[in-house]
Amino acid sequence: MTRWMPYPILSAFLLGMWLLLNQSLSPGHIVLGSIIGVAGGLAISTLQIPSGRIHRPLSIVKLAFIVLVDIIRSNIAVTRIVLTPGRKAQSGFMTIPLDLRDHYGLAILACIITSTPGTVWVNFDSAKGVLLIHVLDLIDEAAWTDLIKNRYERLLREIFE
Amino acid sequence: MTVPADLPDWVAILTSVLVLLGAGLTLIGTVGLLRLKNFYARVHAPTLGTTLGVGCVLLASILYFTVLQSRPVLHEVLIAIFVTITTPVTLMLLVSAALHRDWDEGNGHVPMQPRLGPDTKEQE
């Protein structure tokens, strides 16, 4: 963005991390944290990572809340699968066509899908735009497609595209 | 462990419940790792411990030390952020490695390797 802060979000995150680690909001730590934030941003800029744009900051809060609820729900679902005696989970692979193309959006979708118990991101074919995931409880394929396309991908496209 | 005398009962109870819940979820994840039948299904089980399991333990820690020290103690949030960012990367690497091995050995039950014909351009 500017010469001294090529990655303002990263710099702000580093400042926040510094203040949390030191558990202090004293002016001295704010100055020291700001220096670390700017220095970290400049160090990362030598890697020439493409900078992303966030268009709808409020959607991030909505997405975080949705993901939190989904993580709790799928924790319960996977617990039930593991603890039910003699139950064989119908696990398997499935493909989902994606319209999302932004690198950061895809990275966050990968983290969401993998950190939600019961689904793992396997492979994304960027030429065809087809995502391959592995699902532990593959009974209703349409429901999983609906979940990822309408709950996550729509919001991620709002945020990044 | 000894409970400090000035700790209110409700904090002690809530902290214990959260720690036990977190530990229980991690244990269930480990049992799942043992019980599920193939590698790809097994990858799912430990995520119980790295999501809600770690979340419950961190919430307990935030609650306990915030009340004990009478000021907000929030640096556990950083643990949550770093665990959430790093574990998916490890899991994705493991799954990709397993899939490539299965493709190489020609094992069944895995989807076909995407073919790169002359009409499909490989990006990057």
Image (cartoon, coloured by chain):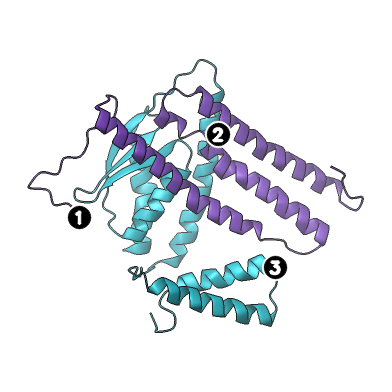
Chain colours: A cyan, B purple
A126 w.r.t. A38: above or below: above
In the picture as drawn, the residue positioned furthest to the right comes out as: B5
Which numbered disc covers residue B57?
none
Residue B37 position within the rendered picture, expressed as x and y whole percent measured from the top left: 44, 22
Q: Which residue is identified by label 3? A: A23
In the picture as drawn, the residue positioned furthest to the top comes out as: A86
Q: Is residue A18 left or right of residue A142?
A: right
Amino acid type at image mark 1: Gln
B98 w.r.t. B73: above or below: above
Residue B14 position within the rendered picture, expressed as x and y whole percent measured from the top left: 76, 44
Q: Is residue A122 left or right of residue A42?
A: left
- Secondary structure under the numbered disc 2 in the rendered image: helix
Query: Quarter-wise, where is residue A104 in the image?
Result: bottom left
Amino acid type at image mark 2: Ile
Residue B53 position within the rendered picture, expressed as x and y whole percent measured from the top left: 61, 41
Answer whether labels 2 and 1 touch (C-beta < 8 Å): no
Q: Is residue A136 visible?
A: no
**Residue displayed at 51% across by 51% down:** B84
**Residue displayed at 29% across by 37% down:** B100
> Crowding at label 3, few (<14), some or many (≥20) Cα neighbours within 10 Å?
some
Q: Which residue is identified by label 2? A: A76
Which numbered disc covers residue B123?
1
> Crowding at label 1, few (<14), some or many (≥20) Cα neighbours within 10 Å?
few
- Secondary structure under the numbered disc 3 in the rendered image: loop
Mark 3 or 2: in front is 3
**Chain assignment, label 2:** A
Measure how far apart labels 2 and 1 are at the Cα level: 39 Å
Residue A119 position within the rendered picture, expressed as x and y whole percent measured from the top left: 42, 38
Same chain for mark 1 and mark 3? The answer is: no
Answer whether labels 3 and 2 touch (C-beta < 8 Å): no
> Crowding at label 2, few (<14), some or many (≥20) Cα neighbours within 10 Å?
some
